[in-house]
Image (tube, rainbow, N blue to C red):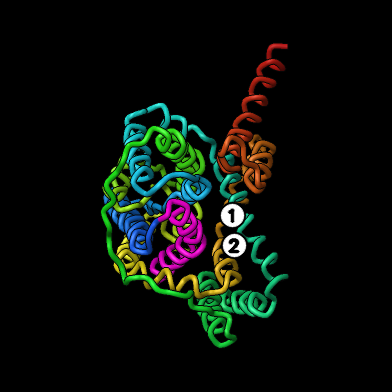
Amino acid sequence: MSLVFSAFVAVFVGFAASVAVVLAAAESLGATPAQTVSWVAGLALAKGAASLWLSWRHRLPIICAWSTPGAALIAASSGLDMAAAVGAFLLAAVLMMLTAAFRPLGALIEKIPMPIAAAMLAGVIFRFVVAVFDEMRLSPGLVLPLLAVFLLARLVNPFLGVIAALGAGIVLSFAGGLAAWPAGGFALSGLEFVTPRFDTAAMLGIGIPLYLVTMAAQNLPGFAVLRAAGYQPPVPACLFATGLASVLTAPFGAHMVNMAAISASICTGPDTHPDPAQRWKAGIVYGLAWLAIAATAGLLLALILAMPKALIVAVAGLGLVGSLTGALTQATSSERHRFAAVVTFAVAASSLTLFGVGSAFWSLVAGLGVLTLDAIAGRLRARS
């Protein structure tokens, strides 16, 4: 059952923690309610199908997600409509498929030392765990009971703590009148085709940046999560599958799917299954759950937005405590890599953004840069 619970928590966290960004992107492009539902349903279809195929084909817990940084990029755009945006989405997806044939990228990812990859993961997760206590300051009446339930339930089973906290939070939200259904409504689900228009401004302003930010801020950390958990991800196959899924769903408004980092960390740790060879089954459950979300996208949009923000933040953070523990252990396991790992962790845990790329990518650059300097200094000392 821990496989099922891990997958469901990953789905809940992946949907609840970033669906508002997708909705903001749809609003910035002037999407109708039907197009907004189609956008989310298309993303759910792509994520579910890609996760199912890749996990089953490679017997690895390969978890796919939508590009949250990409959605933020779209939300910040102006002067574009859905047709032009869909053309840009198609360009980004095709570029992702072409990247699958670029072998040096896969080789680069495979050369990242394990402590550096684990430190990057720890830095990203750290912000979510700390956010639990930041939210407790704002909503102590909801978050403090969730924390108490989590700590008590995990004495019985480490993973049961997250599930118990989630259930308790839903009950408290409705009992305390904290849940608020959004005004208006959505259709249950549906896909609406949007004829793409290949606009130069949209290609340069959204298409290419969407591809770059998805590669840097989503795929690289996603592959690093798998490596930190002891797996060797099939990089070209993953890039091709997510790119193809994005090509097929882009005409329905879906912007991009890619490798997951946060959601993947929930499904790749020992709490999912003590045997690493069995954790791929969580990817199957995860994929099926996203196909179910595609069938009920409108209803779930209304349901998830009814929950208070404090509940979403708390469950996400508590669900990642175990993964943070494992990542920190791996990051500091090697004395030779320890200083570089600490630098990597610090950068990843920050809010650094350079050239539109987030801290996860720059943490890898910083960590590998420190290792390179250490190697050069070692060679110079050896020669002297």
332 on left or right of 33: right
Vertical relation: 164 (above or below) 66: below
* Mark 2 → mark 1, Cα distance in angstroms: 8 Å
- SS at mark 1? helix
Q: Which residues are magenta?
A: 1-30
Seen at 46% across and 59% down, the residue is: 23
Main SS, magenta region, reads helix
Residue at point 55%, 42% (across, down): 117
Please state which amino acid type lies under the numbered disc 2: Val
Q: Nearer the viewer, residue 100 or 243?
A: 243
Q: Is residue 22 magenta?
A: yes
**Quarter of the image that includes the N terminus:** bottom left
Residue 79 on image: x %, y %: 46, 44
Which residue bears the numbered disc 1?
A: 125
SS under mark 2: helix
Label 1 sits on what residue type? Ile
Whether residue 58 can be seen here: no
Residue 357 placed where, x, y %? 56, 39
Q: Give the quadrant of residue 128.
A: bottom right
Name the mark nearer the viewer: 2 or 1. Answer: 1
Q: Residue at x 61, y 77 (%)?
A: 146
Residue 236, image x, y percentages: 34, 37
Residue 6, percent from left and from top: 44, 65
Q: Residue furthest top?
A: 384
Which residue has dot 2 on it? 321
